[in-house]
Image: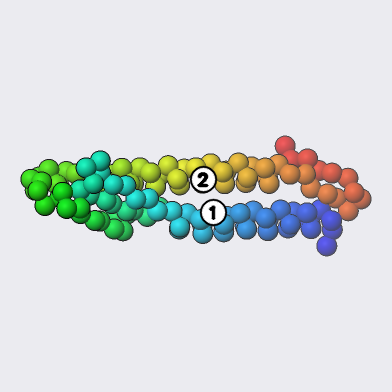
Amino acid sequence: MTSLAQSVIARAIKQRDLLQSMTEQSKTITARVTSRDRAVSAEVDGRGQLTGLWLGAVAVRLDPDVLAALIVETAQAAAQVAAERYNFLLKEFTVRMAELQQSPLVRSDGSIVEPQ
C-alpha cells in the first residue's frame, strides 16, 4: 500500500472516530430546568424529549391551567438548553472535521499533498 493511501486511510479512521465520539456524546446530552417558583422541574434528553418531570409543593396550589402552562414552558426551556448543548457539540465537531479534511496527505516519496 502506498504512503498516500495510508495517509488517506489514517485520515478516514480519524474522521470515523470523531463521528463515533460525536454520536456517543450527543446521546449523553440532558438538560434540567426548574421554574422560578420551584413548582416544576423538567428534564429532557438531547432530542428534547421529556425524560423527567417533578412537581414541587407550590404546584398543588396553582390553578390547573396555570400549572399546565408552567409545565410546558419549563419543558420548552429545558429543550432549548439541550438544543444549545447539542449545537455547541455540533459546532465543535464541524470545526474538527474540517481540520481533518484540510490536513495534508503524504506521498510515498515524502512529498505533501495539500487539500484544496
Picture coordinates of residue 75 (x, y %)? 27, 48
Q: Residue at x 20, y 53 (%)?
A: 56
Picture coordinates of residue 30 (x, y %)? 40, 53
Q: Residue at x 29, y 58 (%)?
A: 52
Residue count near mark 1 (Cα–Cα under 10 Å), binned few <14, some 14–19, many ≥20: some
- Residue 75 is labelled as none
Q: Residue at x 32, y 53 (%)?
A: 43
Pick out the residue farthest to the bottom.
1
Q: Position of 82 compared to 75: left or right?
A: right
In terms of secondary structure, where does tag 1 sit? helix
Q: Residue at x 38, y 44 (%)?
A: 81
Residue at which label 1 appears: 22
Q: Which quadrant of the figure contains the N terminus?
A: bottom right
Q: Which quadrant of the figure contains the C terminus?
A: top right
Disc with the residue nearer the chain's start (1 vs 2) = 1
Pick out the residue farthest to the top.
116
Nearer to the camera, 90 or 57? 57
Q: Position of 50 compared to 27: left or right?
A: left
Say if mark 1 contacts mark 2, CB within 8 Å: yes
Q: CA distance from mark 1 to mark 2?
A: 8 Å
Pick out the residue farthest to the right.
109
Residue 51 shows in the view: yes
Inspect the image, locate mark 2, and give the three-letter code of the amino acid beneath it.
Answer: Leu
Picture coordinates of residue 59 (x, y %)? 15, 50
Picture coordinates of residue 92 (x, y %)? 56, 43
Inspect the image, locate mark 1, and give the three-letter code of the amino acid beneath it.
Answer: Met
Residue count near mark 2 (Cα–Cα under 10 Å), binned few <14, some 14–19, many ≥20: some
Residue at which label 2 appears: 90
In terms of secondary structure, where does tag 2 sit? helix
